Image (tube, rainbow, N blue to C red):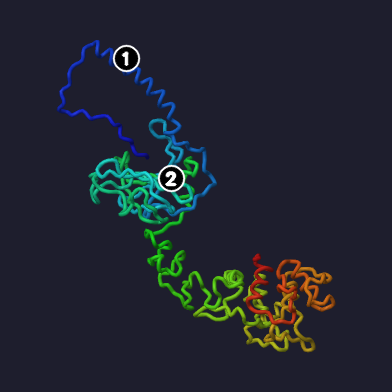
Amino acid sequence: MQPTAPTGHPRVSRFQTVVPMSRERIRRETSMGAARARRALIAFALVLPTLIGNVPASSAGEIYPMIFPVLGPNHYTDTFTTSRSGGRTHGATDIMADRMIPIVAVADGTVGWMQDERGGRCCAMELRHDDGWVSWYIHMNNDTPGTDDGQGWGFAEGITQGVHVVAGQLIGWVGDSGNAENVAPQLHFELHRPDGTKFNPYESLLSATVITVPRTIDDRDGDGVSDAVDNCPDVTNPGQADTDGNGIGDRCDPWTDVLPDYWARASVDALYANGVTQGCASDPLRYCPEDPVTRAEMAAFLLRSLGIDETAVSFTGLFGDVSANDWYAGLVERLYQEGITTGCAADPLRYCPEDLVTRAEMAVFIIRALGAPVGDSQGSFSDVSPDAWFAPYVEQLATLGITGGYADGTFRPAQQITRAEMAVMVDRAFLGGM
């Protein structure tokens, strides 16, 4: 429903004296009234598109991301194209809810027009979003709590025209003001595109983020900690945990030894998010980015990257230097079964699980795990001889964009690979990072 604009016509007091009119005056008044009616009809036809609000045929499939505006029990249906009196189309969603349930801003924006006359035209408002969209909030509370006296106030403290609010901030309460006075309390909610056309909010309401407590203007994540002192202002972390003491909350900065601007941070995060690594230590969580990688660790990294279930591998005693009690026992045997390794020595077959992986060995591990073909070396790196046993693998690694080597044109094949370097290569090879 929409607010009814005041007519501007004076009311006739029941104590006012009414003077009888002559027949001639009645005829003149009737004629003049008919003329006024014709002019009004023409004017109405001209402004009808404006009254309807330029409602588009459909907003199907489009979703506007926002906070759900009503913080409490509610129900609503898609009534966007429903007809209303005077030939209007509804052009909104009525969210039915009890009086005094909080209403919050659906997005960051600035308060526009307001109907804020206490005891008069109240209570509705416009919010002009920072991204150019606009939302309307109509039938907000206008009663003293617990009454239906029309003498209350529908807006939260500080909500005035020109004030900037944040998404989720309290702006008012559900009511039955305007032409909803004799209807159930509700919020008439409208969305307008930046070009001014109305947008069906129904699907966006279904997809909206639901919060239970209004956010404050200086607390974007709603964790009760002011943004001015919040060490992670966009992620809820009321405890403000910061185990490494770098001023960044652990929810934004989970690693105590990998800073947000560390060159391999994105890849380390990708490995962690995909379950490829749990770090090198917990409580606090550490990754040990500059540590070398053992062959046992390499087996775990590769199989996890390939999505192979570690619990599905079994131990058969294939390698002479791997016992059943070793945490990696089944992993290295599965690596052998997949054709990714042939061990470090034969007769007897050994894996050398504690040996450190070189960059050359890393190239072989990754290319075999990918199942990628290898060819002749093209001399991409100045320190990789074309006849070296690992040259085709290193060449293919470069061809696939998994590594570009060092700035001086070298690959440094004999150098031990670090956990950070390994993270970047595994991320690029298996997780889509670049």
- Kindly indicate whether the residue at mark 1 contacts the one at mark 2 (C-beta within 8 angstroms): no
- Kindly state the secondary structure of the residue where label 2 is placed: loop
Write the residue at 28% across / 43% down.
117
Measuring from the top left, give residue 1's x and y in whole percent.
37, 40
Q: Residue furthest front?
A: 408
Looking at the image, can residue 176 be seen? no
Residue 45: numbered disc: none
Which of the two discs, 2 and 1, sits closer to the camera?
A: 1
Taking the image as drawn, is residue 113 in sight?
Answer: yes
Q: Which residue is mark 1?
A: 31
Indicate the secondary structure of the residue bearing disc 1.
helix
Instruction: State whether residue 203 is above or below residue 31.
Output: below
Q: Quadrant of the C terminus?
A: bottom right
Amino acid of disc 2: Thr
The spot of residue 285 in percent (x, y) is: 52, 78
> Which residue is labeled 2 in the image?
77
Residue 32 lies, with reference to residue 352, above or below; the image says above
Toward which corner of the image does residue 343 lie, by quadrant? bottom right
Instruction: Say left or right for 233 vs 327.
Output: left
- Give x and y (percent) for residue 425: 68, 72
Q: Nearer the viewer, residue 119 or 368?
A: 119
> Quarter-wise, where is residue 310 in the image?
bottom right
Name the residue at the top extreme: 24
Q: Which amino acid type is shown beneath numbered disc 1?
A: Ser
Q: Is residue 251 left or right of residue 300?
A: left
Q: Quadrant of residue 393?
A: bottom right
Q: Position of residue 403 (x, y in %)?
A: 71, 70
For the point 34% across and 44% down, the residue is: 114
- Marks 2 and 1, how far apart in space? 47 Å
